[in-house]
Image (cartoon, helix red, strand yellow):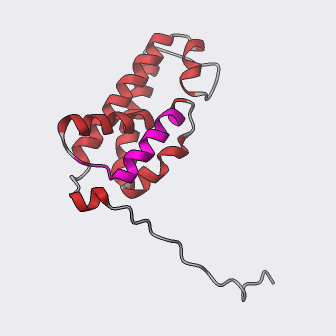
């Protein structure tokens, strides 16, 4: 539930707990519309900075959403497609509620478990550069 990361960002602004860097906030603005269509790659830069906490929060939110859909026996003839699949679900309102509740759970958990960052960390735009590798001696023999 990458939408939950966006909700976590909004909630962190509301609670005045700074948990995302400026670079991550900019990435969230791009990741949100991508997540609506099930393109999850937009959240990778955000998740990679705090992998365990982000994966845990997203897993909990996804688990809650899945449990809601399972409990109400909501089915989908389409395996993937983001919010565009909701109208063809057997119970679209249940699907929408599950998405929203799961996203809220993800956001709340993120705000609770991510550490507060300093002003220097927030403003940091330092990206680690990849080191070049010398593959001239590599062979497949």
Residue 30, image x, y percentages: 49, 40
Q: How many marks are shown on the rendered structure?
A: 0
**Quadrant in which the C terminus appears:** bottom right
Instruction: Give me the residue at 46% from left, 35% from top.
Output: 32
Does the magenta run of residues contain 116?
no
Find residue 82 and report its horizontal and vertical position in percent. 55, 27
Residue 18 is at least partly visible in this image: yes
Residues 55 and 8: in front is 8
Is 4 located above or below residue 43 in the figure? Answer: above
Residue at far right of view:
141
Q: Residue at x 30, y 58 (%)?
A: 123
**x and y, in percent, of residue 102 in the image:** 37, 28
Left or right: residue 90 compared with residue 103: right
Q: Position of residue 104 (x, y in %)?
A: 32, 29
* Residue span colored magenta: 18-35
| Camera-side residue of 118 and 56 | 118
């Amino acid at each position: 539930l990458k939408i939950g990361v966006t909700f976590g960002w909004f909630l962190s602004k509301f609670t005045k707990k700074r948990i995302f860097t400026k670079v991550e906030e900019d990435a969230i603005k791009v990741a949100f519309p991508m997540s609506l269509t099930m393109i999850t790659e937009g959240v990778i830069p955000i998740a990679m900075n705090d992998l365990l906490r982000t994966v845990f929060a997203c897993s909990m939110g996804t688990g809650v959403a899945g449990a809601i859909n399972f409990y109400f026996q909501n089915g989908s003839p389409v395996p993937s497609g983001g919010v565009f699949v909701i109208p063809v679900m057997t119970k679209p309102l249940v699907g929408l509620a599950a998405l929203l509740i799961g996203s809220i759970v993800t956001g709340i958990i993120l705000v609770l478990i991510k550490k507060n960052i300093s002003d220097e960390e927030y403003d940091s735009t330092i990206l680690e550069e990849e080191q070049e590798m010398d593959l001239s001696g590599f062979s497949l023999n």
